[in-house]
Image (cartoon, rainbow, N blue to C red):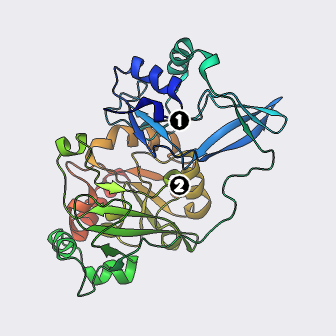
Amino acid sequence: MFDVSKVLNVPLYNALCEIFNDDVRITNAGQEGYIETIKSGDHLLATKSRECEQYMVNCPTCGDRRHRLYISHWAFKPVTKGKWNVFTGSLFYCQNEPTTCDHKELRQQIKAIINPKDLEPVSIPANQRGRSSKKQLKLPGGCIPVNAPEAPIAVKDYLEGRKFDLDILYNGWGVHACENLEEYPAHGPKIIYPVIYNGEMAFWQARLAWDPTKEQQRQGVRKYYFPLGSSKGDVVYNKDEARFCKIVVIVEGITDVHRIGQQGIAIFGKVPTIRQTQIMQNALGHSLGIMLLDSDASESAEEYVNKYKTDIFQRGLFLVKLDKGDPADYTREEIWDILVTKIGEQE
């Protein structure tokens, strides 16, 4: 039985359970983390919360059914930072539709349930800026090159079964393998993908060496794992290499990029965030952009392309839809044949 008393924001958690019929999940349980703020009139506005406990529910705005709306434990708490009051009610983030979801109605529902007297006041030092120092991230312990003889057989078999070349994965992308990942020990060996951004490792991603079913995922089996503090929406995977290309192909995940090649970039979701859009415009704007997302993301992709068709890339932004699966399900030759044919039809 889950001990509600250990939740960092009991009133908020209980309100969400009431609204969502107890279908509330918790990530980073017990992690207080910190918030980032900006000046807004006569108060501070909390814009992001980092490395902290969050409550995951299905987003009522976009119709998400995978608990992709994250609500920080800081939300609605009476927070002061030095002499300033901090508004925390905007600490909602939908990873399904990060640029479009409006949660005003849900906020009103929560406020109608929560008794402000039950919320514990929090005082933050005026000079607190989040992490005390920036430290160089490292791969998790026990990692070895994916093409090394001693790499886990399960990882090698899985990747080669999907027609990935182990030497290219390591020499070109720095992919590693881990027999026992301390941060996510369940479900066998893991594939470790470093996410390099501006010449440094922003974070890493771990992946199972097998494909869980949707039912297994609903039961808690995670295909992917990211370490605490990973800001997926603030980076574009492979931007450093793609900036030299005349064509850039926007895909969802890391393995999709490996299938595309140097021209591929990953956004870790269905549509780019505002920050990722800015990155593409500034670093890749000289290119022709192609959006090639998984078959189940075509509607979101179409809305995004229609909105930014001529605003990001000087040579335009085009949408290519896959009939099934994702780019990593095809060979590189197959995927480029699709791209060339589809773009030719649109020009």
Q: Is residue 332 left or right of residue 204?
A: left
Query: For mark 2, what is the residue?
Result: 229
Q: Is residue 192 left or right of residue 283?
A: left
Residue at the spot 57% in from the left edge and 45% down from the top edge: 274
- Crowd rating for badge 2 (residues with CA inside 10 Å; few <14, some 14–19, many 20+): few
Tell me: residue 99, above or below residue 327.
above
Q: Is residue 247 left or right of residue 65?
A: right
Mark number displayed over residue 103: none
Q: Quadrant of the C terminus?
A: bottom left
Amino acid found under the numbered disc labelled 2: Gly
Residue at the spot 55% in from the left edge and 57% down from the top edge: 280
| SS state under label 2 | loop
Q: Front-most of 224 and 129?
A: 129
Query: For mark 1, what is the residue?
Result: 8
Q: x%, y% of residue 24?
A: 37, 30
Residue at the spot 57% in from the left edge and 60% down from the top edge: 285
Tell me: residue 92, above or below residue 182.
above
Q: Front-most of 84 and 145?
A: 84
Question: Which comes before the other along the chain, label 1 or label 2?
Answer: 1
Q: x%, y% of residue 261?
A: 36, 72
Residue at the spot 28% in from the left edge and 54% down from the top edge: 223
Q: Is residue 259 left or right of residue 136?
A: left
| SS state under label 1 | loop
Which image quadrant for residue 249? bottom left
Q: Front-most of 38 and 116?
A: 116
Amino acid found under the numbered disc labelled 1: Leu
Tag 1 and tag 2, C-beta contact below 8 Å:
no
